[in-house]
Image (cartoon, grey):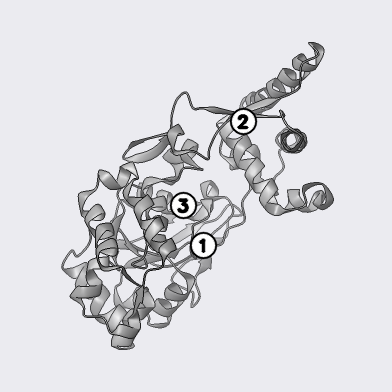
Amino acid sequence: MFRLNYRDFLMRKIQSKFQEVMHQKEKNQAATIKVPNRRIWENTSFERTVKMKEKPTMTTIGVSSVSCRRMVLMLHILTKIYKLIETNTYKTKRELYYEDVTLFKKQAIVDNILDDISCMLNEPKINLHVLTTSKGCIAGNLRYKDGDGNYIDCNETSQGILLPCDIKSISYMQSDARFILLVEKSAVFQMLLDSNVTQLLHPCIMITGKGFPDVNTREMVKRLWNTLQVPILALMDADPYGIEILSVYKFGSKAMSFDAQNLAVPEIKWLGLLPSDIQRLHLSPESVISMTNGDIKKTNQLLKRQYMQCNLSWEKEVQTLLATKKKAEIEGLSKMGSTFLPRTYLINKIRNGGWI
């Protein structure tokens, strides 16, 4: 809930954008809106996290027929946001889309415009009264109250607790966890839950964004770090896409660089599966996959990232992928026995500090 003066401040921000468009029309100029370009690395800098530069290159919306349609949609969504703030109500991105399906045509269009608006106004979407549906899940030694006052015990679940839409509304967060296990994929998360890993490694917390993480999962990982200050150990596939996902959690992303302070957690450690583990563990041939040309291209792109060049141990692991041209998924460890991942690999890695 916002204090009245802050709501007024947000509303004035939006009003100023409409006034800019009106002034252009009064001068018989083409109506345009300028937003920071979130799609180029040149607009970012790196100092522990990927951040948007103070004076980024701007994109002008409204200079072409396609761009004009995008500007109309942006103004339409800004109007809706203004009304949400004015009435102190909230809607999900999905609800905004379904209110005008024929106008927007695709959910992705709404999502991208909302991110541009958030970047342009320099406000997280929750401040604009827009909720993002969560896909991430959490389990283990964690208790908290959600925004509705419900008491959540994450230890009382066999499938994980779905993260709330508003991470900032969480209160009374309590845990005795010694560390947090950040898991890339839903399938591995469930496999570890079925193996009773949160009790085996007790006390700990386990969280997953089910692949490429949504903003809420990233916010939750950040909130856990800020609140608990315990190690966050990441379990990802030993391939360029697993490393990309881990990099988003740790360093931030190009598209959301304007909100890095709320999303990136540079303290995250890479527990596994490390590319060097493939040879070290002598994984069976059926557990190891040859890299495709796309994988090799992606790996080369990762090596060019500034954050990779500033982390020599990570850079060495990525170079191992290129040198061997072999990758492996976490599930491949099950070929070494059904209990190898939870009872041997994880326990030994955590006990011996086998992270980078």
Depth check: 164 or 25 in front?
Answer: 25
Lower sequence index among marks 2 and 3: 2
Picture coordinates of residue 85 (x, y %)?
70, 35
Lower sequence index among marks 3 and 1: 1
Q: Distance between the residues labelled 2 and 1?
A: 30 Å
Lower sequence index among marks 2 and 1: 2
Residue wearing tag 1: 136
Q: How far apart are marks 2 and 3 (CA)?
A: 26 Å
- On residue 3, the disc is 2
Depth check: 177 or 79 in front?
Answer: 79
- On residue 218, the disc is 3
Residue at x-position 71% and y-position 25%: 32
Depth check: 84 or 93 in front?
Answer: 93
Relative to residue 120, is residue 155 depicted above or below? below
Q: What residue type is labelled 3?
A: Arg
Picture coordinates of residue 93 (x, y %)?
68, 50
Q: Which amino acid does label 2 sit on?
A: Arg
> Can you name the residue that lies furthest to the left here?
352
Q: What residue type is labelled 1?
A: Gly
**Dot 3: few (<14), some (14–19), or many (≥20) neighbours within 10 Å?**
many
- In the image, taking residue 25 as reference, residue 309 lies left or right, namely left
> Can you name the residue that lies furthest to the front here?
293
Residue at x-position 65% and y-position 24%: 13
> Can you name the residue that lies furthest to the bottom here?
337
